[in-house]
Image: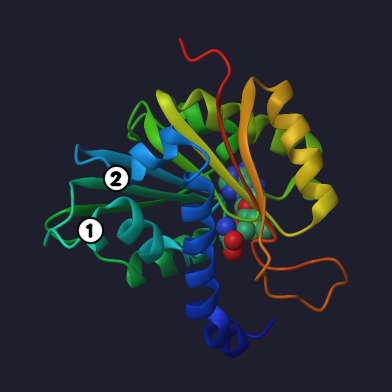
């Protein structure tokens, strides 16, 4: 998809993503707490590319839309292998008094090696996880993502395809994840590849052994 078409649809895609997360939160108290709590929050946007969703996630999890003026203190880490996209994200998203953005280019299969990152995160978000691009690597990425979750933390994934989503959920369960909610996005925007659409499914998981 060209850059301009992507931009044209971005705002609507983000509204739909936000609505989908809110719908999932109705079925999971832990996610509701992550959204509505007022303590500090650490969020890792893993394999984020250019992190299109950064503003939507900071608005939703940062407490801004609750109308309390400034949001809660939030640390937002965007992490991806592709240095160019990460550089673009750090140009696009600047922190403010409540949100501290950090964008890191690196390999998520070795996430534990990045000592500069917080030890745990309340939310690990993975938009359009990419299992079909390499099962071994993504098994490792899911494993590392679960390891980074705080005891009550939530892993949120979205997927482009039905089958890839089901398979990703199986793989994450095998890596120690417990599925809490999965929702199909009835307003998902179709893409040219048959069966592929934007944020077609969203799932919320936690660690099955949160010790
Ligand atoms: C399908 S794209 C999704 C990008 C973005 N989240 C979105 O929804 O537009 C998958 C992303 O995974 C990233 N990725 C693949 N392997 C990775 C790895 N080992 N470590 C970090 N990121 C990786 C790619 O660079 C790519 O940005």
Residue 192, image x, y percentages: 81, 79
Taking the spot 35% from the left edge, 40% from the top edge, the residue there is 34
Q: Nearer the viewer, residue 170 or 114?
A: 170
Taking the spot 46% from the left edge, 28% from the top edge, the residue there is 148
Q: How is the structure coloured here?
A: rainbow
Residue 84 horizontal side relative to residue 139, left or right: left
Taking the spot 79% from the left edge, 57% from the top edge, the residue there is 161
Residue 65, image x, y percentages: 26, 63
| Location of mark 1 (residue) | 66
Q: Nearer the viewer, residue 87 or 60?
A: 60
Residue 93 horizontal side relative to residue 142, left or right: left
Q: Residues within 10 Å of mark 1 (few under 14, many from 20)?
A: few
Q: Residues within 10 Å of mark 2 (few under 14, many from 20)?
A: some
Residue 31, image x, y percentages: 43, 39
Disc 1 element: helix
Query: Image quadrant for the N terminus?
Result: bottom right
Q: Do the numbered discs 2 and 1 sit on residues whose CB atoms are within 8 Å?
A: yes
Which tag, 2 or 1, sits closer to the chain's start?
2
Residue 49 horizontal side relative to residue 191, left or right: left
3D distance between C-alphas at marks 2 and 1: 8 Å
Figure check: 144 above or below 44: above
Taking the spot 47% from the left edge, 62% from the top edge, the residue there is 18
Disc 2 element: helix
* Quadrant in the picture for residue 16: bottom right
Find the residue positioned furthest to the front.
26
| Location of mark 2 (residue) | 36
Residue 96, image x, y percentages: 16, 61
Figure check: 127 above or below 27: below
Figure check: 209 above or below 27: above
């Amino acid at each position: 998809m060209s850059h301009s078409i992507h931009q044209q649809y971005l705002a609507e895609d983000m509204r739909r993503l936000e609505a989908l997360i809110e719908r999932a939160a109705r079925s999971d108290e832990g996610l509701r707490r992550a959204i509505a709590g007022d303590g500090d929050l650490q969020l890792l946007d893993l394999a984020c590319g250019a992190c299109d969703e950064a503003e939507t996630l900071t608005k939703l999890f940062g407490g801004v839309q609750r109308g309390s003026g400034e949001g809660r203190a939030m640390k937002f880490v965007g992490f991806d292998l592709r240095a160019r996209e990460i550089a673009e994200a750090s140009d696009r998203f600047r922190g403010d008094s409540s949100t501290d953005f950090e964008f890191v280019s690196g390999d998520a299969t070795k996430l534990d090696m990045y000592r500069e990152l917080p030890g745990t995160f309340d939310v690990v978000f993975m938009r359009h996880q990419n299992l079909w691009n390499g099962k071994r690597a993504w098994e490792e990425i899911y494993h590392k993502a679960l390891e980074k979750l705080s005891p009550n933390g939530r892993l949120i994934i979205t997927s482009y395809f039905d089958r890839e989503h089901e398979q990703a959920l199986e793989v994450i369960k095998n890596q120690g994840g417990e599925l809490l909610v999965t929702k199909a996005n009835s307003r998902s925007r179709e893409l040219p590849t048959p069966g592929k659409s934007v944020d077609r499914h969203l799932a919320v998981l936690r660690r099955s052994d949160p010790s």
